[in-house]
Amino acid sequence: MKKTFKISEKLPSENVLEFISFLRFLHYDESSDKLLNILLCDDDQEIDDEDSKSWFTHKFPPISVSNESAVLKNIKDLMISQLAKYPTDLEYDVKLMEECNKGNLSLKKNQKNCLVLRLGEKKVKNLFSQFKRY
């Protein structure tokens, strides 16, 4: 199952909560019926079989320690794989931005905007890649 999320380093963020909820659902272990209880007892959340978006916007609280551990490992692994796709690391972009801000490096407006965007993406992914498994 594939779903796209916009993740921010500002917590709590609705997008981050939705992302984590989605992963909690994906890593749900059927040996616990807590998820089913959450779905059945939540009168504020309607689930429509024809509208899968409403299903996955449900904000699931932590289900179990093993589920939460699997979610954090999944996030960490995903962010590490995303960071590996960049040709440079975060430190390189930070130094590049410092040189640009000092006036030692001249970038066109579009190049600087791309650097700002890439730097922001790497900061968020780096933050989430540092999750530890307990």
Image (cartoon, rainbow, N blue to C red):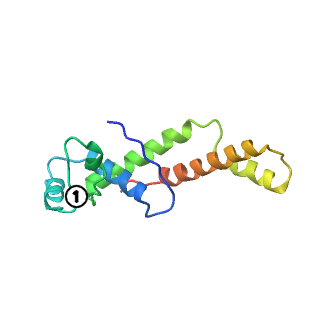
Residue at 67% from the left image edge and 43% from the top image edge: 114
- Give the left or right position of residue 88, taking residue 80 as reference: right
Q: Residue 108 or 30: which is nearer the viewer? A: 108
- Give the left or right position of residue 117, taking residue 127 as reference: right
Residue at 20% from the left image edge and 50% from the top image edge: 47
Res. 132 image quadrant: bottom left
Image quarter (top left, top right, bottom left or bottom right) of the N terminus: top left
Q: Does the rendering let one see residue 33? A: yes
Give the class, few, some or many, for how many residues have Cα within 10 Å of label 1's Cα (few <14, many ≥20).
some
Image quarter (top left, top right, bottom left or bottom right) of the C terminus: bottom left
Q: Position of residue 34 (x, y in %)?
A: 16, 57
Q: Position of residue 88 (x, y in %)?
A: 65, 39
Q: Mark 1 highlights which residue?
A: 45
Amino acid on which the number 1 mark rests in the picture: Gln
Q: Does the rendering let one see residue 90? A: no
- Give the left or right position of residue 101, taking residue 93 as reference: right
Res. 49 image quadrant: top left
Q: Position of residue 61 (x, y in %)?
A: 27, 61
Residue at 64% from the left image edge and 43% from the top image edge: 89
